Image: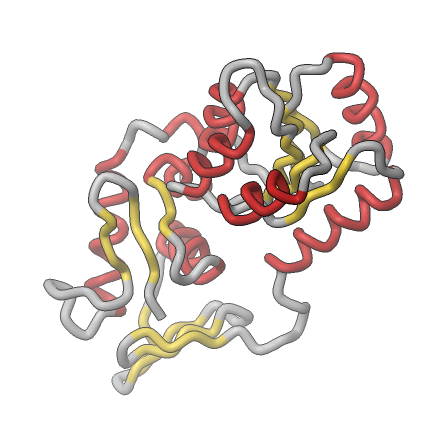
Amino acid sequence: MSHVLIVDDERVYTGALRILLRSRGYEVSVADRGEAALRAVYTLDLDVVLLDLGLPDMDGVDVIREIRKGADPPIIVLSGRTDSRDKVQALDAGADDYMTKPFTPEELFARIRAVIRRLCRPEGAPQIFFIGRSAVDMSSRIVTDESGEIRLTRTEWRLLEQFLRQPGKVLGHRRLLSAVWGPSYQGEAHYLRQYVARLRRKLEVDPARPRHFLTESGMGYRFHV
């Protein structure tokens, strides 16, 4: 079940949209302010954010920029603004798609499916990554180097998957902690430091000078292929 966050302060509209999404099997959360949306992004395991630009406490474009500083859920803007400059600003800030109100339900569902598909690798497709001297086969969950198989714990696998799904992007501390350990662990930054260090020891050629699991000071970590 995909989890959708609706960010809009029009209660009648969000109520109708929530009913519509739930009728198609989506899990739905709602935020009526920009600050509430940012909290939700870092506490919930979201698949898509549906964002209105006209929020009472901050502009929707600023919300997109704040989200993109440390999180990567697909963002579809649902807005009554038709000016091309608004669309360009939203897309440049990091939105994945822009829909002008009004729109049909079927078009919305098609756009949601499209952005979720971009994050999913086809079933059965090879999912092999090379990290230093190691080969990571995600489909069989086996890591090998010239000396044989490298054993990863279940938690190490979950963390590694987060990195491999989003190469080159900064992943915020809270986002990673929530995705790997759960929302109640968002203040446990030492867990993340310890497990990133473990991945470096097992997969980096020189763990003291990592080339793949990079620290982004004050923000989080980034996986470099």
Between residue 8 and residue 23, name the one nearer to us: 8
The percent position of residue 4, horizontal first and vertical second, equals 66, 35
Who's the residue at 50% across and 68% down the image? 138
Who's the residue at 22% across and 68% down the image? 211
**In this figure, which colouring scheme has been used for the structure?**
secondary structure
The quadrant where residue 148 appears: bottom left
Is residue 47 something one can see in this rendering? no
The percent position of residue 220, horizontal first and vertical second, equals 29, 44
Residue 120 appears left or right of 93: right
The C terminus: image quadrant: bottom left
The percent position of residue 167, horizontal first and vertical second, equals 42, 62
Who's the residue at 19% across and 63% down the image? 201
113 w.r.t. 64: above or below: below
Residue 22 appears left or right of 42: right
Who's the residue at 73% across and 13% down the image? 11
67 w.r.t. 198: above or below: above
